[in-house]
Amino acid sequence: MTVLLISSTIATADHPLPFTVKLLTVDANEGCDIADVDNDGKLDVIAGRNWFRNGEWVARPVRQINDWNGYVESNGDFAYDVNGDGWVDVIAGMFIPTKVHWYQNPGAEGLKLGQMWQEHELVDTGLSQNEASFLRDFDGDGKPEWISDSWNKDNPLYVWTLKTGDEAELVRHLIGEKGNGHGMGFGDINNDGREDILVGNGWHERPEGNPFEEPWIFHADWELHASCPVHVRDVDGDGVNDLVWGKGHDYGLMLWRGRGSAEDGKLQFEEQLIDDSFSQPHAVEFADLNGDGQDELITGKRVRAHNGGDPGGAEPPIVCYYTWNADQDRYDRHVIEDGHVGIGLQIRTADIDGDGDTDIVVAGKDGTQVLFNGLK
C-alpha cells in the first residue's frame, strides 16, 4: 500500500449549531448506548453501571462493574433484545477479562423497583487485551454478530454469531489466525462491493461467498494505532472509498483519500490531515447534525486515556464536528464544547428529545453527558 502525504490547513468555521450539555453522572465508564429501555416510546441512555430515563435523567441501576487501573472493567455498551421478550438488554465485554456477558432487562416491575439486571454469560472467548467491541451484521440476516478488536496485533480475529433466546450464546468463526492491532473498521476498502474488516496492522478481505465458511485474505498494509472505529466512506464523491480515522493515543485526525490500486494491486491513498489541535480522537462517528442530508464527522479528545500518559493527555477535553467543504476540498471544524466535555470509547447519536434533530451521547472519564442539538 502506498500513502502519499498532502498538506492541509485546519479550518475552524463559525459554530452554526448550539448544543446544550446535560451531565448525567461521573465515573470512569467509557461506553454508552441509546435505546428505549422502559418501552415508553422515548429514547433513554445506557452507560455502564446505569441507565437514565428520558426526561428524568436520574441514574438507575443496570450492573456492577469493577474499577481497574483507572478504568472500569467494561469496554462498551450494546443495547439489544437478546432473549426476544420485547425488552432491550445490554451486551458488554471487557478489556482484560475474557468473558462476554448480557444483562437481562427486568421488565416494567423490575425497572420500577430499581432492580439490578441479571447477568448471563454469552461466551468465554479466551482472548484478553480487548480494545473495543462492535455489534455488526456481517451476513445480512438482520441479526448482528459480535467482534472485538485487540491491541495485541498477534491475537487471532474472530466474528461471533449471536444465538438469541433464553439460552443465548456466541458461536466462534475464524477470520484470521493473525491480523489484529489497535483500531477497527468495516467497509468496502478495495471497492469490490464486499465489506472488509480493517484492523490496526492491515485489513481482512472478505470472500465472495459465505463469510463464515470461506477464508478471508489478510493484507498487512499498515501499522496504525487507529481509532475504534475507522470509517470507510467516499468523502469526496469521486467513486472511490476513503478512510477517516483518528490516532487513538496521539495527535491527528486523518483522511486517507482512496486513489485506487497500483500496478502490483496494492491500494493507494493520499493522507490529508483534518485536525491535530488535540490528541486522542479515539472514537469517531458520523451523523447528520445540521439537517442538510450529509453526515458530519464527530469526534473529540478521549479523557485520560492511559491515565493521562498519552501525548497531550493532560490537556483539556473537547468535542467537535466537521463538515465537508467541497469547494476547498477539506473538512471544516466546528467546536461543540471546549474544556468540559470529552469522549470515551463510544459516541452515540439519535434524536433523544424528539425535536427532529440529532443529539449526541458521550461517556468518558469526565462523565456521561448528553449534548442536545439546538438546531430545532
Image (cartoon, rainbow, N blue to C red):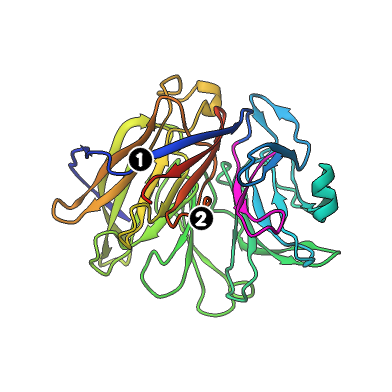
Q: Is residue 34 magenta?
A: yes
Q: Secondary structure at mark 1?
A: loop
The alpha-carbon separation of the residues under discs 1 and 2 comes to 17 Å
Name the residue rendered at 63%, 29% in the picture: 28
Image coords of residue 323 (percent x, y): 28, 50
> Which amino acid type is marked by label 2?
Gly
Residue 137 in the image, given as x and y percentages of width and height? 59, 67
Q: Which residues are magenta?
A: 30-48
Compare marks 1 and 2 and give the one earlier in the sequence. Answer: 1
Question: At 66% across and 45% down in the image, what residue appears?
Answer: 53
Residue at 54 percent across and 41 percent down: it is: 345
How packed mark 2 is, by other alpha carbons closer than 10 Å (few <14, some 14-19, many 20 or more), is few
Image point 40% across, 49% down: which residue?
A: 222
Q: Where in the figure is residue 97, as x and y percent of width and height?
A: 74, 40
Horizontally, residue 290 falls left or right of residue 137, namely left
Which residue ends up furthest to the top in the rendered image? 314
Q: Which mark is residue 18?
A: 1
Task: Check contact, mark 1 vs mark 2: CB within 8 A.
Answer: no
What amino acid is found at the position of numbered circle 1 in the picture? Pro
| Picture quarter with the N terminus | bottom left
Please say whether residue 66 is one of the residues in the magenta stretch. no
On residue 187, which mark appears?
A: none
Looking at the rendered structure, the number of numbered marks drawn on it comes to 2
Q: Nearer the viewer, residue 167 or 7?
A: 167
Q: Residues within 10 Å of mark 1 (few under 14, many from 20)?
A: some
Q: Is 6 positioned to the left or the right of 73 in the image?
A: left
From the viewer's side, name the closer residue of 210 and 65.
65
Q: Magenta stretch mostly in which secondary structure? A: loop
Image quadrant assignment for residue 173: bottom right
